[in-house]
């Protein structure tokens, strides 16, 4: 019944009175939504508002407790994602779902291998050829499909995931399918975002629809025809993009007006003369080379560069995750080498890593246990862990960062993406280290909470901490940093001073990135 059986009113998908509970916690209440054919619907809301949960219900990954859904006017209640795929519905998840030990091709055709299998043998050549075509369909020609996913950059993995879902939904329905994108851009660089948006334009033109979730409001406004706003599990209204601007969306979503001083530039501290970290001729084969700089107390150093510029690898080396092949690192004047993040922590260096689910938190542990992980010294009493100190520390940060949870004993795996990110941030900031390496620290965090996290970063810098920041956007990097390094092809191309009164522009910086 696909493709026909339209409701005759241009409607592709409808949600009626949908509700979802996790035990006593109702996370979606009585949701009604309509999605037109060829319509791109934005979905915004604070962390924990229920955006991912709604998409999972539509994608068949979770089942609703009440309500119904219609696709092309026909009852739609998929019991799993394979059933949803067959109806032309596919989802790109907020947390990447590719299997690391499989190749790109194997991931793209996971669950669809039968078409390449004959007498128990897989025709790898055919599968690789088709995988290349799937990627080429969205303009990607430089991803080796025989490579294991674990050997790819984080952003590249995301593009594979997007290409895969577009192939599954497009391949089934041709037109009239529904693509669910849950924060697809949060790990992508500008170029990939442009590619993705061009692709979304094509999907739309072919008569398919999209539900697009993002915390970058300007992005949602650019791509969406209409925007739904969720608050505490309820649909509190829809606006067309011509009716609103970013400030109005912010207010509708957060419930208070933006202060307008997003990056708190007026609170930017002036760095002291004390060098807390010095790096001399640092390099790692194949990623970056000959990097030297001095980081001062109270300084926020922004490192800008495109994916593959070497900035990620530099951070990995500085926080002890990877080893350098050349050069030296001095912490407060003393040469140090660290073989692990634990070693680095001993020298009071700690990082908010980019891949929170793998490196940032332990999902099967509680919020309290996660916050304590880098802070055992602070939660011990007489040499043993104190449940009370652990609990006090966790409650402090749950309140400070507005972490939405049922309590500090809730496992992190049940938190929404943005709330899990806040737990990572809490663990790191609670460590009271001297040097913080923040790789995309506000990834997936809603605009209201971002405001507060920025204020907190300002505050700790002013108290004497030195920060290295890899920003979510160029704007964030410029806004927060007092000094900026631009990396390209593994080298530092340019340095910019960024005092509160004289910030460099995005254009000036981008010129050295490309
Ligand atoms: N499996 C689960 N068990 C218990 N609670 C859950 C589960 N999954 C989600 N929740 C809760 O449901 C609520 C909504 O979560 P959801 O992931 O839909 O939020 P979101 O709007 O996507 O937020 P974010 O912007 O942070 O990604 C949260 O309070 C979360 O803790
Ligand atoms: Mg989510």
Image: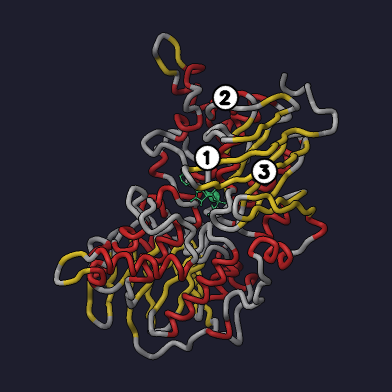
Name the N-terminal-most of marks 3 and 2: 3
Name the side, left or right, on which 17 lies relative to 463. right
Toward which corner of the image does residue 33 lie, by quadrant?
Answer: top right
* First along the sequence among labels 1 and 2: 2
Element type at mark 1: helix
The image shows residue 206 at horizontal and vertical percentages of 76, 34
The residue where tag 2 is placed is 83
Tell me the number on the disc at residue 137.
Answer: none
Residue 70 x, y percent position in the rendering? 70, 30
Looking at the rendered image, the disc whose residue lies closer to the viewer, 1 or 2, is 2
Q: Nearer the viewer, residue 319 or 208?
A: 208
For discs 3 and 1, the disc positioned in front in the rendered view: 3
Relative side of 492 to 183, left or right: left
* Secondary element at tag 3: strand
| Label 1 beta carbon less than 8 Å to ligand 2 | no
The foreground one among 72 and 381 is: 381
Q: Is residue 141 visible?
A: no
For label 3, the residue is: 31
Residue sitting at x 34%, y 63%: 371
Callout 2: 10 Å neighbours few (<14), some, many (20+)?
A: some
What whole-number distance in Å separates the C-alpha atoms at marks 3 and 1? 31 Å
Res. 160 mark: 1
Decide: few, some or many residues near mark 3? Use Cα within 10 Å; few <14, some 14-19, many ≥20. many
Image height of 406 relative to 278, above or below = above
Q: Quadrant of the N terminus?
A: top right
Q: CA distance from mark 1 to mark 2?
A: 22 Å
Q: Position of residue 443 (x, y in %)?
A: 51, 59
Which residue sits at x=53%, y=42%?
21
């Amino acid at each position: 019944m696909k493709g026909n059986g339209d409701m005759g009113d241009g409607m592709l998908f409808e949600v009626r009175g949908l509700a979802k509970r996790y035990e006593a916690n109702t996370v979606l209440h009585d949701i009604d939504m309509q999605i037109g054919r060829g319509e791109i619907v934005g979905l915004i809301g604070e962390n924990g508002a229920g955006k991912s949960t709604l998409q999972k219900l539509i994608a068949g990954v979770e089942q609703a407790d009440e309500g119904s859904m219609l696709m092309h006017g026909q009852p739609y209640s998929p019991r799993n994602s394979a059933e949803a795929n067959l109806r032309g519905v596919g989802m790109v998840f907020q947390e990447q779902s590719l299997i690391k030990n499989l190749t790109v091709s194997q991931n793209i055709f996971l669950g669809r291998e039968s078409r390449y299998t004959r007498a128990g043998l897989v025709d790898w050549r055919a599968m690789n050829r088709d995988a290349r075509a799937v990627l080429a369909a969205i303009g990607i020609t430089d991803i080796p499909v025989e490579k294991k996913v674990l050997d790819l950059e984080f952003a590249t993995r995301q593009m594979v995931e997007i290409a895969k879902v577009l192939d599954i939904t497009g391949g089934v329905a041709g037109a009239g399918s529904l693509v669910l994108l849950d924060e697809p851009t949060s790990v992508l660089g500008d170029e990939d975002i442009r590619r993705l948006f061009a692709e979304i334009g094509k999907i739309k033109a072919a008569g398919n629809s999209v539900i697009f979730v993002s915390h970058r409001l300007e992005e949602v406004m650019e791509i969406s025809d209409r925007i739904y706003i969720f608050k505490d599990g309820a649909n509190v209204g829809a606006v067309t993009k011509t009716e609103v601007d970013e400030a109005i969306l912010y207010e509708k979503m957060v419930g208070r007006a933006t202060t307008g001083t997003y990056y708190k530039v007026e609170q930017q501290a002036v760095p002291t003369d004390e060098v807390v970290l010095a790096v001399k001729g640092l390099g790692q084969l194949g990623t970056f080379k000959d990097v030297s700089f001095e980081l001062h107390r109270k300084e926020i150093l922004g490192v800008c560069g495109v994916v593959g510029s070497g900035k990620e690898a530099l951070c990995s080396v500085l926080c002890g995750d990877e080893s350098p092949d050349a050069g030296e690192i001095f912490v407060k004047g003393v040469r140090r080498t660290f073989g692990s993040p634990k070693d680095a922590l001993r020298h009071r260096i700690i990082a908010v890593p980019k891949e929170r689910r793998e490196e940032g938190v332990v999902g099967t542990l509680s919020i309290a246990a996660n916050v304590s992980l880098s802070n055992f010294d602070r939660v011990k009493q007489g040499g043993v862990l104190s449940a009370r100190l652990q609990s006090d520390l966790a409650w402090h940060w749950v309140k400070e960062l507005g972490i939405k949870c049922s309590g500090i004993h809730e496992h992190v795996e049940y938190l929404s993406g943005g709330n899990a990110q806040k737990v990572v941030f809490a663990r790191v900031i609670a460590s009271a280290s001297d040097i913080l390496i923040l790789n995309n620290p506000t990834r997936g965090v809603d605009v209201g909470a971002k405001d507060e996290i920025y204020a907190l970063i300002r505050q700790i810098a002013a108290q004497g901490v030195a920060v290295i920041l890899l920003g979510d956007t160029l704007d964030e990097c410029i806004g927060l940093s007092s000094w900026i390094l631009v990396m390209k092809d593994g080298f530092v191309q340019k340095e910019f001073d960024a005092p509160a009164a004289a910030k460099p522009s995005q254009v000036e910086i981008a010129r050295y990135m490309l």
